[in-house]
Amino acid sequence: MRKVLIAAALAMPGLASAQTVTPPAVVNGITEPGAKAQPVRARGHAAAGDPAEGVNRGLFSVHQFLDRLLFRPVAMVYKTIVPKFVRTGVRHVISNMSEPVVFLNDVLQLKPKRAVRTFGRFAINTTLGVGGIIDVAKGEKLPHRNNGFGNTLGRYGVGPGPYLFIPLVGPTDLRDLIGGQADGAVLPLAVGDPFNRTAYIIPTLALGGLDQRMELDADLNALLSGAADPYATLRSVYLQSRAAEVGEIRHGRGGGTLDDPLVDPEAATGHVAPPAPADVFDTTPADPDASADGAESGKP
């Protein structure tokens, strides 16, 4: 259940890039030193790793308002009027188009076995899966794994930088924000048409975001609706899960365990920030199958 909630917390439309490559679910519960999110201090004092907390909280509230007014209602309409098999096919095609970026970053991270698996998955689904509509490769024990330049930068020691919350992008940090832009530029620069066309980019992002918001609605509510401070809860889950993934890529070994994301990070302090509205929002899905590949991460 906890991995599902972490995945939900990380699911977002990813509208900042032309290609959604999202942080995966936590693998092996690894946490990098110093990555644990700190409780919110007294008003006027930002938490460690979140120097722009005041601005971030304001943008978080803006996103919640947009989610209540627009994102969630449209996602629910999408769920109602579009048959499930069509939604599934669209999801598979969008996921399949992310595989070249995953492959490139597997290579850059010096993970040849992962790269071979990613290439095999892409080849099988593009051919036997009719352009990725059917996820044939998953049945061949080749599940999708999220990977991107944010992970590659972390692999070579680039720190996360300040935590950021950006409407339409969601929880992120400076490293992942830059990495996401690089992910989105790969296909437009390497292939060109149609990946560099607005007529391709906007519908792809919109459909992917609607699908993610719809699929993770219940999990997002379970994670955030009961939190005294939804902003701090989401920040804690995001920072821990990203630190865990980067730590797994860098060190290839298990570490400690994550704090339970259902435990409000404000509960243990006497300083509870004023809660934001309880409406929840979508972020970028973590890969539910990432754990199947965790054992390889420490191998070349």
Image: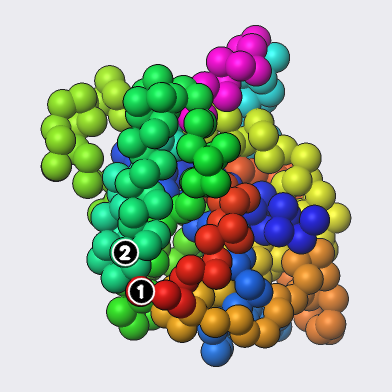
Left or right position of 136 against 202: right
* Badge 1 amino acid: Pro
Q: How is the image coloured?
A: rainbow
- Kindly tell me whether residue 63 is visible in this rendering: no
Percent coordinates x, y for residue 29 in the rendering: 65, 74
Q: Main secondary structure of the magenta part?
A: helix
State the residue at coordinates (85%, 76%). 267
On the image, numbered disc 2 is attached to which residue? 112
Tell me if residue 83 is in the magenta stretch.
yes
Tell me if residue 15 is in the magenta stretch.
no
* Badge 2 amino acid: Pro
Left or right position of 4 against 16: right
Q: Identify the secondary structure beneath mark 1.
A: loop
State the residue at coordinates (65%, 18%). 84
Specify the quadrant that holds the C terminus: bottom left
Residue nearest the observer in this picture, 281 or 94? 94
Q: Residues within 10 Å of mark 1 (few under 14, many from 20)?
A: few
Percent coordinates x, y for residue 245 in the rendering: 52, 70
Percent coordinates x, y for residue 182 in the rendering: 26, 54
On the image, numbered disc 1 is attached to which residue? 300
Residue nearest the observer in this picture, 4 or 221? 4
Q: Residues within 10 Å of mark 2 (few under 14, many from 20)?
A: some
Q: Which residues are magenta?
A: 81-93
Q: Quadrant of residue 122?
A: top left
The answer to whether marks 2 and 1 mark residues whose Cβ atoms lie closer than 8 Å is: yes
Q: Quadrant of residue 42?
A: bottom right
Q: Identify the secondary structure beneath mark 2.
A: helix
